[in-house]
Image (cartoon, grey):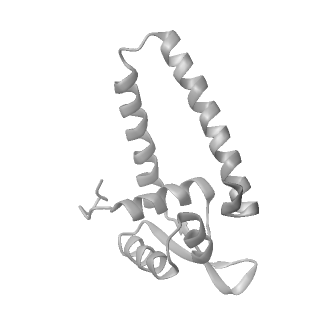
Amino acid sequence: MTVDDGVPLDEACHRMVRHLSFRGPMRPSALSDELGTGRSNVSKMVKRLETSGLVAREPDPGDSRAYRVLLTPAGLDVAQRFYDLGDRLTDQVLSDWDAADVETYTRLTERFARGALSRAEEIRRHGLDAV
């Protein structure tokens, strides 16, 4: 996907935009942890997204020495376009499924997501030994 100025958005920046749209403003260190990438990579992504007008920096209300990264209105618009695209693709894939198949798929996907989130939380609390 490209932003309005035609600059392509790579997968890492795409993930950051989606993450910020879901979680709200975050410190770069928290973004690094949650995205599973180095702080220097986060810094580069923030600069790239800032140059494209998709993110901005704001002082961290909890620590005047730190800042948080947040989506600008343009960034929120791009994030919404990501979600809308995903919805359209899902609709296309499921268009020839009957209602019972969609219900089964939805139920199993929700079950899988709950299980994955639960296991991820265990790993966060107890480390990889929890696997």
Relative horizontal placement of residue 79, taking residue 111 as reference (left or right): left
* Residue 64, image quadrant: bottom right
| Depth order, front residue of 69/13 | 13
| Depth order, front residue of 131/78 | 131
Q: In this rendering, is residue 97 above or below 15?
A: above
Q: In this rendering, is residue 31 above or below 14?
A: below
Q: Position of residue 79 (x, y in %)?
A: 45, 52
Quadrant where the C terminus sits is bottom right
Residue that lies at the very extreme toward the bottom in this rendered image: 65
Q: In this rendering, is residue 74 above or below 63?
A: above
Relative horizontal placement of residue 108, taking residue 98 as reference (left or right): right
| Depth order, front residue of 27/99 | 99
Going 62% across and 71% down the picture, which residue do you hit? 30
Going 57% across and 69% down the picture, which residue do you hit? 31
Relative horizontal placement of residue 62, taking residue 9 as reference (left or right): right
Q: Position of residue 117 (x, y in %)?
A: 66, 46
* Residue 51, image quadrant: bottom left
Going 54% across and 76% down the picture, which residue do you hit? 57
Q: How many marks?
A: 0
Q: Position of residue 90 (x, y in %)?
A: 41, 30
Q: Position of residue 81 (x, y in %)?
A: 40, 46
Relative horizontal placement of residue 60, taking residue 35 as reference (left or right): right
Going 41% across and 47% down the picture, which residue do you hit? 82
| Depth order, front residue of 126/108 | 126
Q: In this rendering, is residue 115 above or below 76?
A: above
